Structure formats: structure tokens, C-alpha cells
Image: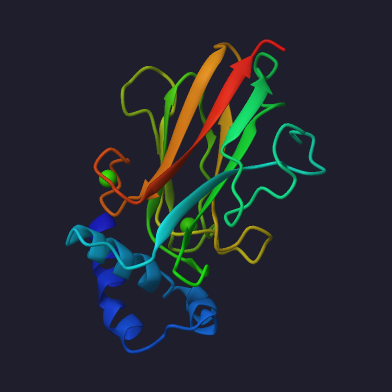
Amino acid sequence: MRLAFRTAAIATLSITAMGLGSPLALAHGDGGGTSGGGGSYGASHDRGSGRDGVRAASYINRDTGAATENPDVDRGSSCANPDHRDQQRLSDPGTANRNVHNDACFLDDRGQKVNGPASFQSSGVGFISACPDPDGTGPQYSRLSDTNGDGRNDLCFQSSYQMTGAAGDLEFHARLNNTTMPGVQHVVWCADADANGCRDERVKDGIRIHWNNG
Ligand SMILES: [Ca+2]
Ligand SMILES: [Ca+2]
């Protein structure tokens, strides 16, 4: 499945290279060829050079208006203006009532959002509580896993950015939670064509949550 996806992504490289450089072209690709952005990015990264000007931006979403709204996070926190740090009280036992919403983007040198397979990787306290499928029943997919077997999910791989037609499209999304362990949770987000996490990647960004007892 992964190999098939990567092959398809690389196949779109030539299309991307033929000049689909405008934001309009990117939007046009949302029907399924959007992996062109990510595919070309991942392929470049595999060559060790990276695509010029593409950078990772990860931020904490304030969840304005939601039950989980977090007033400690900047109101304007976004890919363009990321708030990377949060102080958060532990969620009540057995709930996610104070979970943290981590969003992220790849931005090209004009500040436009581009696609690419990517992963959120958590370390320290806490866990990844949600790793949504980017397109619901469509061909893109997510995979949430516990890579070190400690009972806490720490790796969220997503084959593309969100493309559901809802708010938050063109960005990557995960939810973080913690009910029992005060301390610091680090979450790195990276371009991850090989779907194995961020330690072998160079294009990445990260956020940090200080969980406390309130
Ligand atoms: Ca899907
Ligand atoms: Ca990797």
C-alpha cells in the first residue's frame, strides 16, 4: 500500500515539473493528485537536497469556541504565525476534555501550503489521542501507532494533508492528550516519506506542552 502510494506520488512529479506552480493548480489537484506536491517533496528529500524553500510549520491550535479551547495559546496561532508552547492542565481521568490540537503545514517559498506525507511524533509524557484520516473514505490514510510498546500512541503518519472540504483543509491535524503524567510532551512534525518518524528527517518543526495538575 505504501509502496503503491509512493509510486503514484512520484508519477505525478513530471506533472508538477511541467508548471503546476500556481496555488490554483494546487487546489485543482485536491481531487486525488495532490500527492504531487508531497510526492515531489518526498522524492527531493530522498535525494538529500530538499525542495528549495519548503519548510515545516507546526503550531498549537487554540480551539477557539470549542469545549477544549485553550486561552494559553495565541489567538492567531497558525502555520504563518505558530505558537509552539502551551501550559495545559491534565484532562480528567478517562476523558480528553483538555486535549491539545496540533496542526501543521508545509509552506513553500511564497507561503503557499503544499502537500506531502508527514508524521507527528510524540515523546516525553502524554500520547497522541487522534490521528484523523486526511480524506475520510478516500484513498489517503493515516496510521496511529505505539512504536516503543509502552501503551501510549506516539506516531501519527498521514499520507496527505486534510482534504475533506471542511475547515482545516491543506493542513495536517493531530490531537494530544494526557490524564495522568505531569511533565513535558514534545511533539515533532516532519516530512516523512518513509513513514517511520522524524528522527531521520531534516524538514521538521515541533511544539511543546507542559502538562500540570492545575
Ligand atoms: Ca482515507
Ligand atoms: Ca522518517
Displayed quadrant of residue 85: top right
Percent position of residue 177, x then y: 58, 26
| Residue found at x 32% / y 29% | 147
Displayed quadrant of residue 115: bottom left
Percent position of residue 178, x then y: 58, 20
Percent position of residue 25, x then y: 49, 83
Q: Seen from this angle, which residue lies furthest bottom?
A: 18
Left or right of residue 88, residue 152 in this image: left
Q: Indicate whether 206 appears above or below 5.
A: above
Q: Indicate whether 93 appears above or below 100.
A: above
Is the image coloured rainbow, by chain, by secondary structure, or in one colour? rainbow
Q: Does residue 1 appear anywhere in the picture?
A: no
Q: Seen from this angle, which residue lies furthest right?
A: 65
| Number of numbered discs visible in the structure rendering | 0
Percent position of residue 51, x then y: 31, 67
Q: Nearer the viewer, residue 196 or 207?
A: 207
Q: Indicate whether 209 appears above or below 52.
A: above
Left or right of residue 106, residue 177 in this image: right
| Residue found at x 75% / y 45% | 75
Q: Does residue 174 appear anywhere in the picture?
A: yes
Q: Which of the image's four quarters has the C terminus?
A: top right
Left or right of residue 205, residue 8 in this image: left
| Residue found at x 63% / y 58% | 168
Q: Nearer the viewer, residue 78 or 31?
A: 78
Q: Which of the image's four quarters has the N terminus?
A: bottom left
Q: Indicate whether 126 appears above or below 69.
A: above
